[in-house]
Image: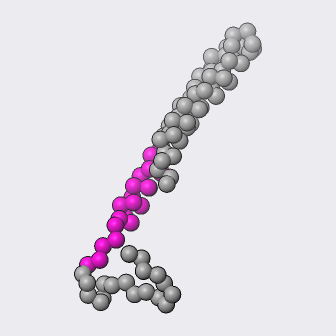
Amino acid sequence: MLTRWLIPAYFIGVGLPWIIGAWIKTGYQPGLVKGDPQPARDLIDIFCISLSLFDAALVFTVGMGCLVVSIMKGPVRWGDASHATQHVREPGERERF
């Protein structure tokens, strides 16, 4: 049941870097840092953008993997009622139907 965690993981992974970045940027105000604080603030923004894109790509990749696995597994289908396609039970194995 990994797919039910994909949407919350997306929103947390995209939003959390911006919240942490905004908190870190409060320390880079004019007068608190020697020189111009804007390049450091821009670097934090670039880091937040890269983390958000990384998380979006990660969640998309996991979602596509879940989709492929669910399609490849699919429902069980038996071709016909001949003995060649019937499931052979091992001794002690229960009926699955």
Report the front residue among 59 and 90: 90
**Residue 19 in the image: above or below residue 57:** above
Number of disc labels: 0
Left or right relative to 97: residue 54: right
Q: Going by the picture, which residue comes out furthest to the top?
A: 31
Q: Quadrant of the C terminus?
A: bottom left
- Residue 65: say if magenta: yes
- Taking depth in this image into account, of 32 and 34 the one nearest to the observer is 32
* Residue 10 counted in the magenta span: no
Q: Residue at x 35, y 61 (%)?
A: 71
Side of 78 where 92 appears, left or right = right
* Coordinates of residue 74 in the picture (x, y in percent): 35, 65
- Viewer-proximal residue among 47 and 74: 74
Q: Measured along the vertical axis of the image, is residue 67 above or below residue 44? A: below
Judged by its main secondary structure, the magenta piece is: helix
User: Where residue 58 appears, x then y in whole percent?
Assistant: 50, 46
Among the 4 quarters of the image, the one containing residue 96 = bottom left
Q: Residue at x 39, y 60 (%)?
A: 70
Q: In this picture, which residue range is highlighted in magenta?
A: 57-79
What residue is drawn where x is 75% and y is 13%? 32
**Above or below, 89 relative to 1:** below
Q: Is residue 59 visible?
A: no
61 w.r.t. 93: above or below: above
